[in-house]
Image (spheres, grey):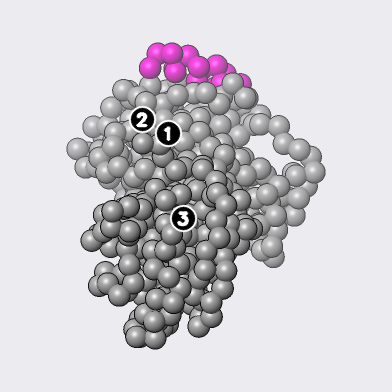
């Protein structure tokens, strides 16, 4: 199976529910800022509101990073609204909830379980050019952690800005001291 | 193990490295003292002490002194003895502003050799305009450079900062091998290196040139 890293988001047009309104969203809306596409199986389920609520609580921190959140399920935007009306957790969500009943987005990102018509718990971090820089896909029942997602967004941004100047820190307790090498003294 | 039992040979220094270092040390103008504060019971401390002793024996321009934590508190006020091993470079009995926390193995051997070369002279050439700028700095600034021994960018950043410290009395540049001090990784949230922390406030990521570092230092009056 081919991976998604460095793949650019393809054209899509979906309806969405955002802070009480119905709006239209396309791939163009994902350009110019960092984005997270946060797929989940379905509205009115148990793990989903926990995850989406966790994400809502961290939303301001994502905004500070210049990152927009888009949750995605295979429900319609009308069902999103009904869920928000019925659930205190969903009501407080400030980010955009995309409706993907035709499976357009879920199929594009490889998370659609066709026979169930639901999406796996896939999370995709896209750069301002709409290119996937990190992602994870969980099976239906395995929840995700918004704080960890925020760390990944920050890391992705950092690498994009400083990637050629830094090394990832690998703190391995007990790692032996490396044999020395004198490869800079030639600069004297 | 007592300090007096520390070997004068380091397994990290091969005959080829010895020859390379002798080539650099033949150029040294002044004398530099390497003062190493160690915990004689800790492996990293013993490793660094052996390295420092070995290197010091390669030229009469270098001397070496080993202290334990208690002695250092009394005789070496400039050393931060909370992070051992700590090695400071002194010239004519005076702190150069250059110190190392950890073992200068891997790429960081380059940093140590450059630090000696810059402290003893002749040192790396420096742009005259930058030297003038550094001469005007009067605020005492501390530069911490967190590194990993396998990181090429880290050694370059340490060399740059320590060269600035060698040229400017107001500056202190400390290399810190973050792997050895998990409390530092936690405190400064270090995920990538080199990470440079100036006066506990400003953070620079990656290898920067002198002017970029100076632009931060100049904000302190």
Task: Give the residue at the far right of this rendering.
Answer: B129
User: Which residue does the image show at 56% across and 73% down from the upper left?
Assistant: A23
Element at badge 1? loop
User: Which residue does the image show at 41% across and 75% down from the upper left?
Assistant: A80
Query: Quick check: can you spot residue A59?
Result: no
Q: Which residues are magenta?
A: B14-27
Q: Nearer the viewer, residue A68 or A97?
A: A97
Q: Disc 2 vs disc 3: Cβ atoms closer than 8 Å? A: no
**Residue B117 badge:** none
Q: Chain of mark 1?
A: B
* Above or below, A121 relative to B16: below
Q: Chain of mark 3?
A: A
Q: CA distance from mark 2 to mark 3?
A: 50 Å
Q: Disc 1 vs disc 2: Cβ atoms closer than 8 Å? A: yes
- Same chain under badges 2 and 3? The reply is yes
- Same chain under badges 1 and 2? The reply is no
User: Which residue does the image show at 39% across and 48% down from the upper left?
Assistant: A110
Whether residue B23 appears in magenta in the rendering, the answer is yes
* Above or below, A47 relative to B113: below
Residue labelled with disc 2? A178
């Amino acid at each position: 199976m081919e991976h998604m890293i460095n793949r650019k988001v393809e054209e899509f047009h979906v309806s969405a529910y955002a802070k009480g309104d119905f709006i239209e969203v396309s791939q163009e809306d994902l350009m110019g800022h960092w984005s997270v596409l946060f797929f989940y199986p379905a509205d009115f389920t148990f793990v989903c509101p926990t995850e989406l609520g966790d994400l809502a609580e961290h939303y301001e921190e994502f905004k500070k990073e210049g990152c927009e959140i888009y949750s995605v399920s295979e429900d319609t935007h009308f069902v999103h609204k009904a869920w928000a009306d019925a659930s205190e957790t969903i009501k407080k969500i400030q980010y955009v909830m995309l409706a993907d009943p035709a499976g357009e987005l879920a199929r594009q990102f490889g998370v659609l379980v066709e026979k169930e018509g639901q999406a796996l718990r896939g999370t995709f971090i896209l750069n301002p050019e709409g290119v996937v820089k990190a992602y994870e896909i969980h099976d239906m029942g395995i929840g995700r952690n918004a704080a960890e997602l925020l760390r990944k967004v920050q890391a992705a941004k950092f690498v994009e800005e400083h990637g050629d100047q830094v090394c990832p820190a690998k703190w391995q307790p007990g790692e032996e001291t490396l044999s020395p090498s004198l490869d800079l003294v030639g600069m004297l | 193990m007592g300090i007096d039992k520390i070997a004068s040979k380091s397994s990290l220094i091969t005959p080829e490295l010895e020859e390379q270092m002798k080539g650099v040390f033949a150029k040294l103008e002044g004398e530099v003292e390497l003062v190493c504060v160690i915990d004689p019971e800790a492996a990293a401390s013993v490793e660094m002490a052996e390295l420092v002793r070995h290197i010091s024996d390669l030229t009469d321009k270098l001397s070496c002194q080993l202290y334990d934590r208690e002695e250092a508190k009394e005789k070496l006020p400039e050393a931060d003895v909370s992070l051992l091993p700590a090695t400071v470079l002194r010239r004519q009995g005076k702190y150069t502003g250059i110190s190392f926390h950890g073992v200068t193995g891997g790429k960081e051997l380059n940093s140590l050799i450059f630090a000696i070369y810059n402290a003893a002279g002749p040192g790396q050439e420096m742009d005259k305009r930058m030297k003038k700028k550094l001469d005007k700095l009067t605020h005492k600034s501390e530069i911490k450079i967190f590194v990993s021994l396998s990181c090429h960018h880290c050694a370059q950043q340490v060399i740059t900062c320590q060269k600035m410290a060698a040229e400017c009395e107001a500056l202190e540049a400390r290399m810190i091998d973050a792997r050895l001090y998990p409390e530092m990784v936690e405190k400064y949230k270090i995920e990538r290196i080199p990470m440079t922390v100036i006066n506990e406030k400003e953070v620079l990521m990656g290898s920067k040139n002198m002017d970029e570092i100076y632009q931060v230092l100049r904000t302190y009056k």
